[in-house]
């Protein structure tokens, strides 16, 4: 317990200690001396000078002068941080530049993975994934599946080689074949497990730059009839397949030659089976051309009596000579509306396919003999081997062999 009487010297020393101790408090000094705060306060009022030593600023009392070695370490640390930041900024600039050429190809995500794989020796996988914004786990999963992708790529390359063969005329192929017919050829005679999906065929053809030949702009060749002769439309745009030997369509198309002249092809096509039963070529579009095609169709079928032949309103088809031939053969003439190509769409589609597949994207045939040979080969191939989508991707002759319909016989 604190004493109640202190010498004057004690009191003076207590006040001096308080006033000379920087930052000291009455309570702190009183506790140190074992006296009450009130007593010390009374003494400072009675004996104190009223002046106290101010505490030194914290920086002056707590911080020590930096040594040379410490300064070197601090500067080295700051330099390392600056270099790391500069490196980070350079990566954020350079990595996207390098990756840009990858992102423009097909599947962007797959190509981001491929970019990381190709550049992981230059930058860390973690940093690459951060900059191009993909998950590292997704990248590693993609890497783990590399074996399966290699197998699929090899299988796709083998499929592409088969497709090239099917499109190579030198190997009995057809350059005009697109996805549907290529798929049908690949699956012909194959067990179900070995069949290939048309979507895969389309993808492989697209990735390997394979495509069927496309047709150039069509030129109109029909010369309008000036006689006023008209025949009813017995087809009514009904171009469905069915029994062969009942309905036929025909048209004339031009075949351009390199010397600036044209050859002309007249056709007679069985609407039921899509078979080209008659055709004729000449360097003119006179009535004899369409007459020769109809006569050849009559010879192929043995009889055309009671059959319908549908055409446009071209002058050769409305001529009296052609009408007389139709009467002799028992053919019923049919025509669509004037100026409507849709009414004879099947014949025009046939002409388009013929020129697309014979010209192979060229503008003209080299000469007339070349055109004759090309049409002769194609016409026979069309009937015997060329797959027709309307027939379920089989050839017209195969369709006629499989159908139960009986063709008209010669009288």
Image (cartoon, helix red, strand yellow):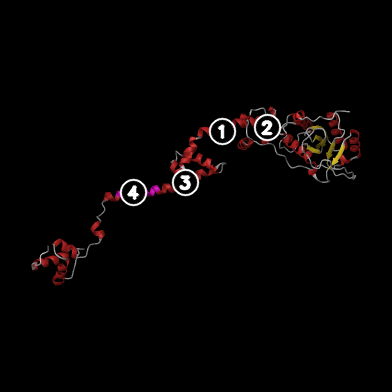
Crowding near pointer 2: few (<14 within 10 Å), some, many (20+)?
Answer: many
Q: How many dots with numbers?
A: 4
- Position of residue 306 in the picture relative to residue 202 (left or right): right
- Compare marks 1 and 3 and give the one earlier in the sequence: 3
Which residue is label 3 attached to? 131
Whether residue 68 appears in this view of the structure is yes
Residue 142 location, x and y as percent? 50, 38
Quadrant in which residue 45 is drawn: bottom left
Q: What stretch is highlighted in magenta?
A: 72-84
- Compare marks 4 and 2 and give the one earlier in the sequence: 4
Q: Are marks 1 and 3 in contact (CB under 8 Å)?
A: no
- Compare marks 2 and 1 and give the one earlier in the sequence: 1
Q: Does residue 344 sit above or below 32 in this rendering?
A: above
Q: How far apart are marks 1 and 4 (CA)?
A: 51 Å
In the foreground, 5 or 290:
5
Residue 395 location, x and y as percent? 74, 31
Residue drawn at 36 percent across, 49 percent down: 79
Which residue is label 1 attached to? 153
Crowding near pointer 1: few (<14 within 10 Å), some, many (20+)?
Answer: few
The label shown at residue 184 is 2
Q: Distance between the residues labelled 4 and 2?
A: 71 Å
Helix, strand or loop: magenta stretch:
helix
- Compare marks 4 and 3 and give the one earlier in the sequence: 4
- Position of residue 344 in the picture relative to residue 73 (left or right): right
Residue 358 location, x and y as percent? 74, 34
- Compare marks 3 and 2 and give the one earlier in the sequence: 3
The kind of secondary structure element at disc 3 is helix
Question: Residue 127 in magenta?
Answer: no
Which residue is label 4 attached to? 77
Quadrant in which residue 374 is drawn: top right
């Amino acid at each position: 317990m604190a004493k109640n009487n202190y010498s004057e010297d004690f009191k003076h020393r207590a006040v001096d200690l308080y006033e000379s101790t920087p930052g000291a408090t009455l309570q702190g000094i009183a506790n140190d001396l074992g006296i009450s705060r009130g007593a010390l306060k009374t003494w400072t009022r009675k004996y104190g000078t009223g002046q106290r030593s101010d505490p030194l600023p914290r920086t002056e009392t707590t911080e020590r002068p930096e040594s040379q070695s410490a300064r070197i370490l601090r500067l080295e640390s700051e330099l390392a941080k600056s270099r790391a930041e500069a490196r980070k900024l350079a990566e954020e600039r350079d990595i996207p530049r390098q990756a840009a050429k990858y992102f423009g190809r097909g599947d962007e995500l797959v190509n981001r993975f491929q970019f990381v794989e190709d550049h992981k020796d230059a930058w860390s996988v973690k940093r690459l994934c951060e900059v191009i914004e993909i998950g590292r786990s997704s990248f590693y999963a993609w890497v783990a599946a590399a074996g399966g992708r290699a197998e699929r790529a090899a299988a796709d390359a083998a499929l592409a080689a088969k497709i090239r063969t099917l499109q190579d005329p030198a190997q009995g192929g057809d350059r005009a074949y697109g996805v549907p017919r290529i798929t049908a050829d690949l699956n012909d005679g194959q067990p179900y497990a070995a069949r290939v999906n048309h979507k895969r065929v389309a993808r492989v053809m697209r990735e390997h730059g394979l495509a069927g030949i496309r047709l150039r702009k069509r030129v109109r060749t029909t010369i309008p009839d000036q006689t006023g002769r008209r025949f009813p439309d017995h087809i009514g745009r009904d171009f469905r397949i069915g029994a062969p030997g009942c309905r036929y369509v025909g048209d004339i198309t031009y075949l351009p030659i390199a010397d600036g002249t044209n050859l002309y092809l007249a056709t007679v096509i069985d609407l039921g089976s899509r078979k080209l039963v008659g055709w004729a070529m000449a360097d003119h579009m006179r009535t004899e051309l369409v007459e020769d095609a109809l006569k050849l169709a009559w010879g192929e079928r043995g009889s055309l009596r009671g059959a319908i032949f549908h055409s446009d309103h071209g002058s050769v088809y409305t001529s009296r000579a052609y009408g007389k031939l139709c009467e002799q053969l028992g053919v019923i003439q049919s025509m669509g509306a004037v100026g409507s190509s849709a009414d004879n769409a099947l014949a025009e589609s046939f002409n388009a396919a013929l020129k697309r597949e014979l010209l192979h994207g060229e503008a003209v045939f080299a000469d007339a003999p070349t055109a004759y040979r090309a049409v002769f080969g194609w016409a026979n191939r069309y009937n015997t081997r060329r797959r027709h989508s309307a027939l379920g991707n089989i050839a017209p002759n195969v369709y006629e062999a499989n159908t139960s319909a009986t063709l008209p016989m010669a009288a």
